[in-house]
Image (cartoon, rainbow, N blue to C red):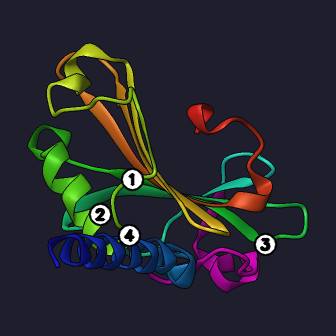
Amino acid sequence: MKHLFYLSLTFISALTYCQSIQNLDAKNGFKEFHLGDSKNKWANQLTAIDHSNYNYTGSFSTAFSYPIKKIVLEFNKSDKLIKINIALGDMEKVSLDHLINLISNSFGPPTYTYPSELSESSIYIYENVQYIWKGVSVMGGVLIKRINYPSFEISLIFQDKSVNKTASTDY
């Protein structure tokens, strides 16, 4: 009977994880930004950075309870949205564990981390820290870059997996 209980608990945990990561594919982006949408949807709210990347100049407030500094949208040659990069503001106040927990509540635990053993103090040791969530068609991630101690740049990234140009560690 004890084994049946543990087997049931393991099955329920696995099912919950699968449903959580499915949320990443179901949302297909972030708020009103859906991967595959046409650039025309935001035509009056984009400023070109280069041939495929644009600053979104429309209104935005928070992502997972943290203030947004800027949003960069990347489009393919067919003008379809393939990547959403959300830079968070007020980096001195960001609690990494809190942010990861908020995202994990939506998408389940990260499917990949770099370095593999992370804690909040890791951001002081490594130049780049990554948390990656991989759905079937969408990849989401948190990228932390050390600029100058104690300053950090934290980005939330949502990307169409079919256009992943580089290895996931280059995310």
Q: CA distance from mark 4 to mark 2?
A: 5 Å
- Residue located at (50% from left, 78% from top): 22
Return the disc, 3 or 4, that comes first in the chain's sequence: 3
As helix, strand or loop, the secondary structure at mark 3 comes to: loop
User: Magenta stretch: residue 35 in it?
Assistant: yes
What residue span does the magenta drawing correspond to?
Answer: 30-47
Q: CA distance from mark 1 to mark 3?
A: 27 Å
Where does the N terminus fall, quadrant-wise?
bottom left
Instruction: Please state which of the two labelled residues, at mark 1 or mark 3, is closer to the viewer.
Output: 1
As helix, strand or loop, the secondary structure at mark 4 comes to: helix
Instruction: Please state which of the two labelled residues, at mark 3 or mark 2, is closer to the viewer.
Output: 2
Check disc 2: other Cα within 10 Å, few if <14, some if 14-19, many if 20+. Answer: some
Q: Are marks 1 and 4 in contact (CB under 8 Å)?
A: no
Residue 15 is drawn in which quadrant? bottom left
User: Magenta stretch: residue 104 in it?
Assistant: no
Q: Which residue is mark 1?
A: 110
Return the disc, 1 or 2, that comes first in the chain's sequence: 2
Q: Which residue is mark 3?
A: 80
The amino acid at mark 3 is: Lys
Q: Along the horizontal axis of the image, is 144 left or right of 35?
A: left
- Residue located at (61% from left, 66% from top): 138
Q: CA distance from mark 1 to mark 4?
A: 8 Å
